Image: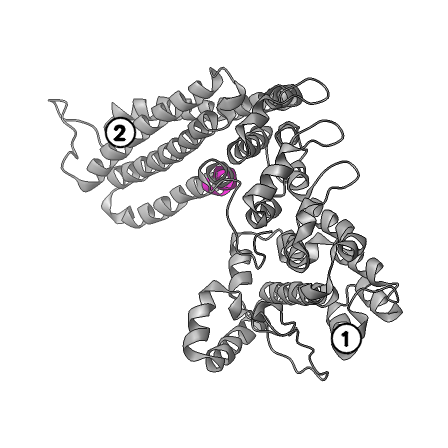
Amino acid sequence: MLLLNILIKSNLFGTALDLLEKYPELAPPNEGNRYWKTNFDIMVRKPRIYASGSRLGFWHNFIYQCIPLQEEKNHYPRQRMGGDIEKQTDRFQCCSAESIPLKFLKATFGKLSHELNIMLWKPIMQLAPTIKDIHDQKLMHTQKLAIVRKMIGDSKDWNYKKAIDFLAKPAFAAVRLGIYEVVDEILDAYIGLVSFTDELGYHMLSLAVQHRQEKVFNLVYQVCHPMVRGQLTMGKNIRGNTILHIAAVLAPSSEIPGAALQMQRELQWFKTVEKYFHQSLQRKHNSAGNTPREEFTETHKLLVEKGEKWMKDTATSCSVVAALIITIVFTAAFTAPGGTDSHGKPNFLHELSFKIFAIAVALALFSSTASVQMFLGILTSRYAEDDFLFSLPKQLIIGLITLFFSIASMMVAFGSTFCIVISHPWRWVTFLIAAAGTVPVTLFAWIQFPLFLDIFISTYGAGIYKPIKSKVVYM
């Protein structure tokens, strides 16, 4: 027991899992296992060693989903729990069962596809250390979850008293930290914990709302029976707050960039809880005498001011650039490259380069003008709370898109002008100019794309509530 405790503290989860497989009597909680609570508490207070706590980018997450776990020889007999195959604790189980892109291959070709897949990934991991790190990270996540499953054991072994003594505190810690995998395993062992409240009167659903843990909220909401869910959400904690009051209180977050996006997220949480729970919650007062909407307005005053300042600063900077582009392309529209004849007709009117120049200048002028209008709309907005939900982000998205097109069109117009004015022997220079013209466009996209992507996903994404797959049935 002491050795297992040291291994878990040292993050040596592979060796700890081997030890549990060789000595399965160390896993289940009982009065004689004095290290169980300490070990399990450590397991639920390290969110970054679970898949839900890993902050992977788009491409890293894609590789994480596709890469298989290499099977390694296990010298100890495996202790299987029987029943649901998802509860088996084979530490080197192929991740194809979890990886959507590989499900079809596994079902069609079976073990051969798995071996071929591993053979494909082995040289890739040797050539790319980053992919090897992702593989090791995924292996650690799998081992950690397997240890949790072994320590929890079979659901038949749990009753109310034992669940309160051993699982209640770890479950609430996992909810606060957003480790939905552990919450799912705990509720699979004893689902009655969803109706348990802590010393402050918070249950799992309200605690997930308070800490803005989206995946845990989806999981607990999904496994609760509607009648149980209604009874829980109609109650109040010791401060007299309903779950809608809890959603109305500002929750500090370091994961959301920009005050405006944080304000949008806060509104989305409040609207989601308001939508999915009883309408009578909107009229209830807390111990301070505030309704949920009054509580939201009071606690978000400073964030509204910060969001307004962030929006105005961004709109001001972008509108200056758009105005400069308007000035440039408006002048260029009346200055034909290559000159004009005595009748004012451009000398290169029938050249393809001149046609490209004319179209690019027109597109640059129109898109930059639209961009200025969008940013002007942001600057003159009334900045009400609900404006941060959809109106302001939509204008910012359109403004950034049109500004990007105006910059790209302006560079196309510049390249076509060069093609017109440079003589034949120097035609090859136009290719260099065209290549150089992509640099400012690429730089703008590289700098602004992360912000644009965050705003777009936050505004037009799936929202807070997204049903997820769970092994737990209704309570």
Quarter where residue 362 is shown: top left
Q: Secondary structure at mark 2?
A: helix
Q: Which residues are magenta?
A: 445-452
Quarter where residue 109 is shown: bottom left
Measuring 11% from the left and 22% from the top, which residue is drawn there?
A: 343
Q: Is residue 396 above or below residue 427?
A: above
- Answer with left or right where residue 378 lies relative to residue 240: left
Taking the view exactly as shown, the residue that stands out farthest to the left is 343
Which is more N-terminal, label 2 or label 1?
1
Measuring 19% from the left and 41% from the top, which residue is drawn there?
A: 352
Residue 454 or 165: which is nearer the viewer?
165
Q: Position of residue 38 (x, y in %)?
A: 84, 58
- Answer with left or right where residue 365 lies relative to residue 215: left
Measuring 51% from the left and 49% from the top, which residue is drawn there?
A: 467
Residue pointed to by mark 1:
24
Q: Quadrant of the N terminus?
A: bottom right
- Answer with left or right where residue 394 lies relative to residue 90: left
Q: CA distance from mark 1 to mark 2?
A: 74 Å
Q: Is residue 72 visible?
A: yes
Measuring 62% from the left and 64% from the top, which residue is drawn there?
A: 138
Q: Nearer the viewer's eye, disc 1 or disc 2? A: 1
Q: Is residue 21 above or below residue 264?
A: below
Amino acid at pointer 2: Ala
Residue pointed to by mark 2:
362
Residue 212 or 196: which is nearer the viewer?
196
Residue 301 or 450: which is nearer the viewer?
301
Query: In the rendered view, how is the structure colored?
Result: one colour
**Label 2 CA crowd tier, 10 Å (few <14, some 14–19, many 20+):** many
